[in-house]
DNA sequence: CTTGACCTTGACACCGGCGTCAGGGTTTAC
DNA sequence: GTAAACCCTGACGCCGGTGTCAAGGTCAAG
């Protein structure tokens, strides 16, 4: 299939696909007229990339997952390098969450300090 | 005082101060030679800006706080507009925290799905 | 033959808060 | 008089993942 079809099926823009290629994540064959030609494996790779991006991974993070798929594994996450990325990402997420919780507390404190009584109604969340 | 001294006392770069001015947050008088001239009020404003930035506010967010200080209030947060920003920021933080928690769960799930048993050792945090 | 839907590469724009360099002028100290 | 330490404006770079426009080539239907 060509880039437009892959884009539609994967739910991404053609621009994104060309960018992934530029970043070395997907490699398209070229037909005689220079058009990119993709197969089902490429679709799977793109799907993997998208699912990683949506949970906060970068394209660099996605590399080992793509390599893992290319190596024939059923899922991109079942290789040591991918697992390492998972772990690092979990740690980064935990750190980020801690930071945000601290900030939230700080902001709430500043609010109640600057405007005592303004902080009513601040129970329902968390 | 001139920009270098203000920068040192406030713990920011001169570049940052010029940027704040460009964004309309601080307004320096100019001495005969064109140098920026600041006073203690400016120092307080910059301190306010820094404390807001470090808890995740943007410069745009900081505007009402600066206006509040300029209006003579003791703290930048004790004006209605500032309180509104506080509230919006709290809501945004809560939303962001929810998103990150969901992502963390998602990543943990993908990890244990891709590599059953790899997710041991995942108890100590949170 | 033309229209239109597809494809190509290349490159600028965006967001935020600066860092950093270029290419100057001013003031103070020795 | 000259070095050093200030100050000025203007402008590009960064980061990540695209959106979007420019200026083309290709191919099938009518």
Image: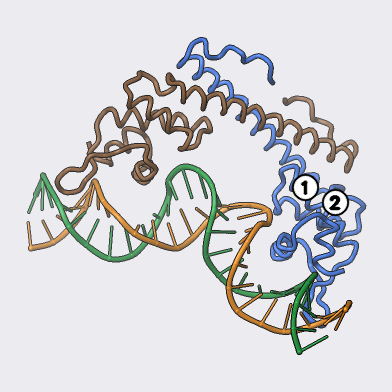
Chain colours: A brown, B blue, C orange, D green
The residue under label 1 is B52
Q: CA distance from mark 2 to mark 1?
A: 10 Å
Looking at the rendered image, the quarter that the C terminus of chain A falls into is top right
Residue drawn at x 36%, y 32% as measured from the top left: A46
Report the residue marked by disc 2.
B76
- B12 or C21, which lies in front? C21
Residue at 51% x, 33% y is A57
Choose between A74 and A103: the one closer to the eye. Answer: A74
User: Percent position (x, y) of residue C30?
Assistant: 88, 79
- Where does residue B114 sit, x and y in percent of width and height? 45, 16
Q: Element type at marker 2?
A: loop
Q: Which residue sits at x=70%, y=36%?
A: B91
Q: In the image, is residue D18 above or below residue C9?
A: above
Q: Is residue B112 above or below residue B38?
A: above
The part of the image, by quadrant, that contains residue B24 is bottom right
Residue C25 shown left or right of residue B122 in the figure: right
- Chain for numbered disc 2: B
Point out residue B103 in the picture as x, y percentages from the top left corner: 57, 26
For disc 1, the neighbor class at 10 Å (few under 14, some 14 to 19, many from 20) is some
Question: Above or below — where is A21 with respect to B17?
Answer: above
As rendered, which of B19 and A67 lies closer to the eye? A67
In the rendered structure, the residue with mark 1 lies on which chain? B
* Res. A10 image quadrant: top left
> In which quadrant of the rendered view does residue B64 lie?
bottom right
Disc marking residue A21: none
Q: Are marks 2 and 1 in contact (CB under 8 Å)?
A: yes
Q: Name which of mark 2 and mark 1 comes first in the sequence.
A: 1
């Amino acid at each position: 299939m060509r880039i437009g079809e892959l884009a539609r099926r994967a739910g991404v823009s053609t621009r994104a696909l060309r960018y992934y290629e530029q970043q070395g994540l997907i490699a398209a064959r070229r037909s005689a007229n220079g058009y990119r030609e993709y197969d089902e494996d490429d679709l799977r790779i793109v799907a993997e990339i998208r699912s990683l991006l949506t949970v906060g991974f970068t394209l660099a993070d996605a590399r080992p997952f793509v390599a893992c798929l290319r190596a024939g594994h059923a899922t991109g996450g079942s290789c040591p390098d991918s697992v390492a990325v998972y772990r690092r990402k979990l740690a980064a997420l935990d750190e980020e969450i801690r930071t945000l919780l601290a900030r939230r507390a700080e902001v709430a404190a500043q609010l109640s300090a600057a405007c005592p009584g303004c902080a009513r109604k601040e129970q329902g969340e968390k």
